Image (tube, helix red, strand yellow):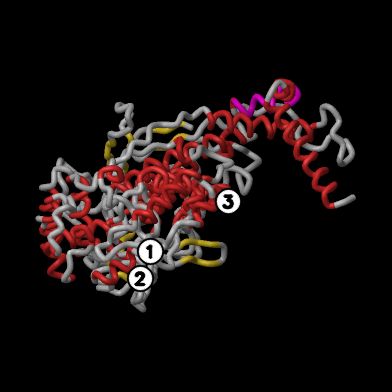
């Protein structure tokens, strides 16, 4: 047989396979539903059948009519087809944008980092148009033709066009438009970021209502005066205890255009220490412990405060100097610590699963987790002879879902970043402020709420520049700001954990970093901390940590909480259809406080 003959034979096999698949999807599906019997019904209803899926004595390789192996295979097809049909039925919502890309021909309201820029930091229009061409075509060749300003590359834009084998795809999820460049909302978010840059090295333990820290009190006072600011409030106002805490941003279902968003404060996130308990406890990993103490950047290690450094980063040139690290590991005790922790650490949620599922070791103090029960819907809670495991409903199963969900979360978030919003990063906004004030570029429409703020004035006094200081020497990743990718991973993984574990359980022996020595922990004594509340806190800790770093806006992580939650729900919906156990539904509390049933 020649090489060409073999190729033709392979093509014929491909055609036969495709034809078989088509037969199954058309009239053949009814026939197979009948043959699969009760198992097919289980794919839709979740009710277990009496079909036998084990050996029937048929010799290996045989697929006689009625063979249980064949029934199982057909059942798998029915389940996968039903899941695909359910996902396909999810309509595509509106995807409104803030209009900045159309409003400003020089693209000052859009993310252009990594492309060539002029001395003022404005992008080469031809280079930006090349990116638009690639986004429109999805052709890998067009992506390879995008001109770069330096050595840093765009971060995986074409990956968002990969087809998920579980859950819905990017266009089926919605978020409100990002705040417009010239809006009071964007300016209020900038005021918050400049305050965070000023307070990075202040212990988070000072964010209490009895604080004596004058800078914290001035920050609270200024943010309270900004009507457009969407941070969490208590008793109608921002307090030191709500300062820099988390919010979630949902599309308002009452507005069919999709343009209106509603901010909510996730349940439990204003209770207790700023840092989630899941970030303060050593994680048991078999015979090892993953320590909660981290290596963090030394106080005062800030970047992008010089114009030449800032411009180089906009062009995608690698940073000239590295981070200086504190030699002593410690618990997350400052905003800078949190920023460094979330720099690149998606294992946080895998660790959270271990802390939930592994019980305390009574013989070895500190060696073990919280030992939280599974959710009440777990079918093995009432079994006399079986338990969940790697396959379904056990701790290893929970761990297996998290990295897969993380990857799919990034596809969804990046689809919004590259193909819809392309919102500018805070570092680029800081450049507009610099030119507006230093070089009198009145054409840059930065809102007066940031230009006239105490936060900006104090930042100039501390850093000698109107640019926003950053924790990471490279600034932000080379993709747009809205929504947040890391926060998207956090939200989707936290949602999976809330669905699988008892979110109402109270965490025993809560702790917080010692204000006098962050290498140690001290007991927290206050309102009880629940699993759900601390998981919600973990999600926004992960998102707001990137704000402390200077690379994201509040709206970025807030939108990602709702978006990641929806992705996780679509994955859980697919998973539910696959189970053999008698299982009705997942139930958990969403970030907006309502109950979800999947």
Question: Which residue extends farthest bottom?
Answer: 327
Identify the disc placed on residue 396.
Answer: 3
Residue 579 location, x and y as percent? 62, 35
Q: Residues within 10 Å of mark 2 (few under 14, many from 20)?
A: many
Give the image location of residue 277, x and y in percent. Answer: 37, 56
In the image, 115 versus 57, the foreground residue is 115
Query: Horizontally, is 287 left or right of 243 in the view?
Result: right
Residue nearest the observer in this picture, 116 or 229: 116
Task: Determine the CA span between mark 2 and mark 3.
Answer: 30 Å
Callout 3 environment at 10 Å: few (<14), some (14 to 19), or many (20+)? some
What's the distance in space between the residues labelled 3 and 1, CA to CA?
A: 25 Å
In the structure shown, which secondary structural element does the residue marked by tag 3 occupy? helix
Q: Judge whether 246 appears above or below 521 on screen.
A: above
- Residue 164 magenta-highlighted: no
What type of secondary structure mainly makes up the magenta span?
helix
Task: Look at the image and tell me whether residue 488 can be seen.
Answer: yes
Q: Position of residue 148 (x, y in %)?
A: 42, 62
Q: Which residue is mark 2?
A: 296
Query: What range is drawn magenta here?
Result: 33-44
Q: Earlier in the sequence, mark 3 or mark 1?
A: 1
Q: Which residue is mark 1?
A: 341
Q: Measure how far apart labels 2 and 1 are at the Cα level.
A: 7 Å
């Amino acid at each position: 047989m020649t090489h060409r003959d073999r190729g033709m034979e392979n093509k014929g096999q491909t055609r036969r396979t495709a034809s078989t698949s088509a037969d199954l999807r058309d009239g053949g599906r009814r026939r197979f539903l009948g043959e699969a019997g009760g198992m097919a019904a289980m794919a839709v209803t979740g009710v277990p059948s009496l079909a036998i899926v084990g050996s029937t004595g048929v010799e290996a390789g045989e697929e006689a009519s009625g063979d249980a192996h064949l029934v199982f295979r057909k059942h798998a097809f029915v389940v996968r087809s039903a899941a695909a049909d359910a996902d396909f039925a999810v309509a595509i919502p509106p995807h409104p944008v803030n209009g900045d890309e159309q409003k400003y021909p020089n693209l000052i309201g859009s993310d252009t980092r990594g492309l060539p820029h002029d001395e003022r930091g404005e992008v080469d229009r031809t280079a930006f148009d090349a990116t638009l061409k690639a986004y429109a075509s999805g052709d890998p060749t067009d992506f390879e033709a995008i001109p770069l300003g330096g050595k840093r590359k765009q971060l995986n834009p074409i990956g968002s066009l990969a087809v998920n084998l579980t859950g819905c795809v990017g266009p089926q999820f919605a978020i409100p438009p990002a705040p417009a460049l010239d809006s009071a909302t964007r300016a209020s978010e900038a005021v918050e970021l400049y305050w965070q840059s000023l307070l990075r090295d202040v212990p988070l333990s000072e964010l209490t209502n009895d604080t004596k820290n004058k800078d914290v009190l001035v920050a609270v006072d200024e943010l309270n005066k900004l009507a457009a600011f969407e941070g969490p409030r208590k008793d109608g106002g921002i307090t030191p205890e709500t300062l820099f805490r988390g919010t979630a941003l949902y599309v308002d279902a009452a507005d069919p255009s999709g343009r209106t968003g509603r901010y909510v404060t996730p349940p439990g996130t204003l209770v207790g220490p700023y840092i989630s308990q899941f970030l303060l406890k050593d994680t048991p990993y078999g015979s090892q412990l993953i320590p909660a103490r981290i290596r963090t950047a030394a106080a005062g290690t800030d970047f992008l405060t010089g114009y030449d450094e800032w411009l180089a980063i906009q062009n995608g040139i690698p940073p000239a100097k590295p981070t200086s690290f504190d030699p002593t590991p410690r618990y997350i005790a400052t905003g800078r610590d949190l920023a460094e922790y979330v720099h690149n650490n998606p294992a946080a949620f895998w660790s959270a699963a271990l802390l939930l599922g592994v019980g305390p070791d009574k013989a070895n103090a500190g060696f073990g987790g919280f030992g939280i029960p599974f959710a009440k819907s777990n079918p093995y809670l009432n079994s006399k002879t079986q338990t969940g495991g790697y396959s379904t409903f056990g701790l290893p199963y929970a761990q297996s879902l998290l990295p897969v969900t993380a990857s799919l979360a990034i596809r969804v978030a990046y689809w919004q970043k590259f193909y819809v919003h392309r919102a500018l990063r805070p570092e680029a906004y800081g450049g507009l402020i610099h030119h507006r004030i230093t070089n009198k570029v009145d054409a840059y429409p930065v809102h007066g709420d940031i230009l006239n703020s105490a936060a900006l004035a104090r930042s100039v006094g501390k850093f000698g520049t109107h640019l926003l200081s950053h924790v990471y020497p490279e600034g932000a990743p080379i993709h747009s700001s809205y929504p947040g990718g890391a926060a998207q991973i956090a939200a989707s993984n936290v949602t999976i954990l809330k669905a699988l574990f008892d979110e109402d359980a109270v965490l025993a022996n809560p702790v917080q970093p010692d204000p006098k020595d962050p290498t140690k922990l001290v007991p927290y004594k206050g309102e009880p901390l629940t699993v759900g509340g601390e998981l919600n806190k973990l999600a926004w800790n992960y998102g707001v940590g990137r704000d402390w770093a200077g690379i994201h806006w509040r709206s970025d992580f807030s939108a990602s909480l709702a978006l990641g939650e929806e992705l996780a729900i679509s994955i859980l919906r697919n998973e539910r259809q696959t189970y053999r156990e008698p299982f009705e539904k997942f139930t958990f509390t969403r970030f907006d406080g309502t109950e979800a049933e999947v």
